[in-house]
Amino acid sequence: MNDQRLRLDLADLAEEVTPVDLRDRALRTSRRIGIQRAVATSAAAVVMLAAATGTAFAILPNRGTDPLPATTPSVTASPSPSASPTPSATQSPSAPATGDAGATAGAATFGRVLYGAHPGTLGEDNKAAGHLYSWQPGDGPKRLLAIDPLVAVLNAAVSPNGRRVAWVEDDALWVSAADGSGKRKLRTGVDGQCWGPTWSPDSQRLTIGTISSDPGAYRTGTIEVSSGRFTEVGPADGCHPVWSGDGRTIAYAEGSGGRVILASPTGKGKRAIPGLGGDARYSCFDVASLSPDGDRIALYRRGPDMESGDVARELDANVVLDTRTGKAVSLPLGGRELRQVYFQSDGSMVVRVRGGERYTLILVDENGKKVTEQAEPSSLKGMQIIGVAD
């Protein structure tokens, strides 16, 4: 190949990698899930190379080192969680950590915490990653249904009541009981990397995006789990929706601009969280959990010196924001690094922190006060929380 031909090819590539909507990127990659699964097995890397812009977007499963969220805007990378032995259903729970001076006696209690494979351990010999697990402080981890680790990372979702799991595999939407029984296919032609699946607060419906060979045929809406009936509703201009516990609000990452939008489930009343996207210092492409009334949100906030990441779902959280002001909410972390946050139906939060190699869950009430904390079983450290059930 001569120099002139190379320059022409690079110019063509530059035209192809201009900024595009996050949903469109996800749709293109969702059709590669079969390839990604093979890549996960071989621990190879699939990379979209934006040569003209100097930007490379990594497509799962090889995301490189796992970012370690922190309580400050500056986040530095750290090694991925190491693979752990399979959690035992009879494992003795860790002793509760001693409360600090900020602890309060509250009515909030830990729900069941659901775990799945962590992106940083895909391709490793982590036997635990082939299943979902549940754990509630005071008990031992319990093994749930068997599931492809890559699918668990991309889209597996546990219903708010903890009874059912939904996931998309090979563009088909599946639902089963949490233990894997009663597995059934609800629909084909479903997006598994952008718009859901996400459970409604009543655990009766799923928010999904439907796909076809025609890019213009993308639709978002809800599907009734009992009947499989699809109703087209809501916005189709973003990714990774989450519901508020009262069912009145959804939040999602909008396109490639780094904004986070709140709207009604029908898409009306849209508003952006201040301080994210556009000309703001921070951006966000992944949201993790929304408070019951939509006034607070847990998400992964990126500073100007941080890469945008890939199109896949990311459940890490490095901040909780007030959705009206965009200001960070103070959390009682005790000097430890924030990893994940999930809101419970009473407004309390299950906060996952890391101190050294130790992971701990902190129960924080709706007023931001620490209620208690519990050391997480070491066998779960190579996994990530994918939900908290009442």
Image (cartoon, grey):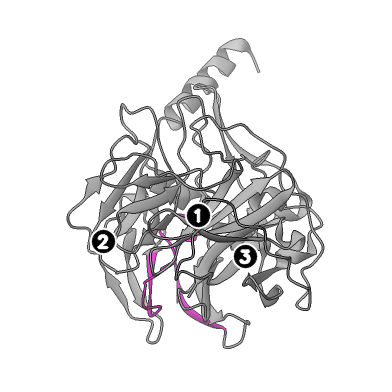
Dot 2 or dot 1: first in sequence order is 2
**Separation of residues labelled 2 and 3 (CA atoms):** 29 Å
Identify the image quadrant of residue 344: bottom left
**Separation of residues labelled 1 and 3 (CA atoms):** 13 Å
Q: Which residue is mark 2?
A: 234
Bin the neighbour count of mark 3 within 10 Å (Cα to Cα): few under 14, some 14-19, many 20 and up.
many
Give the vertical position of 51 relative to 119 (above or below). above
| Disc 1, SS | strand
Q: Which residues are magenta?
A: 183-208
**Separation of residues labelled 2 and 1 (CA atoms):** 25 Å
Give the vertical position of 250 relative to 43 (above or below). below
- Say left or right for 45 vs 102: right
Foreground residue among 9 and 60: 60
| Disc 3, SS | strand
- Say left or right for 318 vs 135: left
The question of residue 193 being in magenta is answered with: yes
Identify the image quadrant of residue 372: bottom right
Q: Which residue is mark 1?
A: 341
Position of the N terminus, as image quadrant, is top right
Residue most toward the top?
3
Check disc 2 and give the amino acid type: Gly
Q: Which residue is mark 3?
A: 115
Q: Nearer the viewer, mark 1 or mark 3?
A: 1
Foreground residue among 136 and 263: 136
- Say left or right for 82 vs 253: right
| Disc 2, SS | loop
The question of residue 11 being in magenta is answered with: no
